[in-house]
Image (cartoon, rainbow, N blue to C red):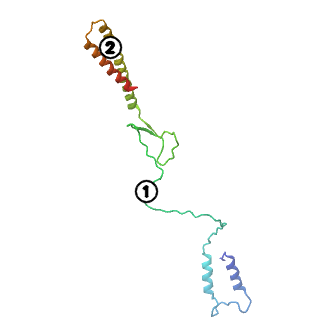
Amino acid sequence: MPCSHPAVQLWSLAYLRSPSPWAPRIGSAGPRLNRQVLDKRRRALRHAVSVPVVTQLVTVEDFPVRRRTIGILESPATVIIRSRIDSQVLEQHVTDGEIVKKRRSAVHADDREIKATIARDEATIAKDQAAFTQAEAALRRTQELISKNVAPQQQLEQATAAYKAAQQTVERYA
């Protein structure tokens, strides 16, 4: 089986068919090749593996520098998110490392406890306003009775004190 490489084929044809007197002869001594060496080279070339060569134009580019190390990476621009109220987080709308835009909701907290607290406080305000209205009415009634000399002065003083206490309580919410 002949060798597939064109340069080897040309050399082997020139070697075997050369009529010139200086061409190498089979079996001659000296620096010339003998038949055994030639056969070994032919066998080696028959079993040689061809290597594909790919070419590409050269371009000038920056070489990226990559470093591997062990450690902790910390961003210079970090924000700690804290809640002003105690509550459980129901939904988290962002992930770690995500860039968050202004006015975007990051988490959704459970607000049932907060709504219950607001309702309780509104009920307390309504109760205190009702107590103020009642103390105001009692003070007017006592003043009328005092003007008719029917009620003692002590009752007027108690009604006035109750009115002022209720007034301070209501003004605290304003």
Image height check: is 103 above or below 78? above
Q: Which mark is residue 72?
A: 1
Query: Closest to the observer: 120 or 62?
Result: 120
Query: Closest to the observer: 100 or 149?
Result: 149
- From where the camera sits, is residue 123 visible? no
Image height check: is 69 above or below 21? above
Q: Position of residue 133 (x, y in %)?
A: 36, 16
Relative horizontal placement of residue 20, taking residue 85 as reference (left or right):
right
Q: Amino acid at mark 1?
A: Ile
Image height check: is 28 above or below 120? below
Q: Categorize mark 1 by other alpha carbons within 10 Å: few (<14), some (14-19), many (20+).
A: few
Q: Position of residue 92 (x, y in %)?
A: 45, 41
Residue at 39% from the left image edge and 31% from the top image edge: 114
Q: Amino acid at mark 2?
A: Leu
| Figure quadrant of residue 148 | top left
Element under label 1?
A: loop
| Figure quadrant of residue 17 | bottom right
Element under label 2?
A: helix
Foreground disc of the pair 2, 1: 2
Q: Residue furthest right?
A: 19
Task: Kindly identify which residue carries mark 2.
Answer: 139
Q: Position of residue 105 (x, y in %)?
A: 49, 39
State if disc 1 and disc 2 touch (CB < 8 Å): no
Residue at 71% from the left image edge and 80% from the top image edge: 10
Image height check: is 80 above or below 65? above
Relative horizontal placement of residue 124, taking residue 24 as reference (left or right):
left
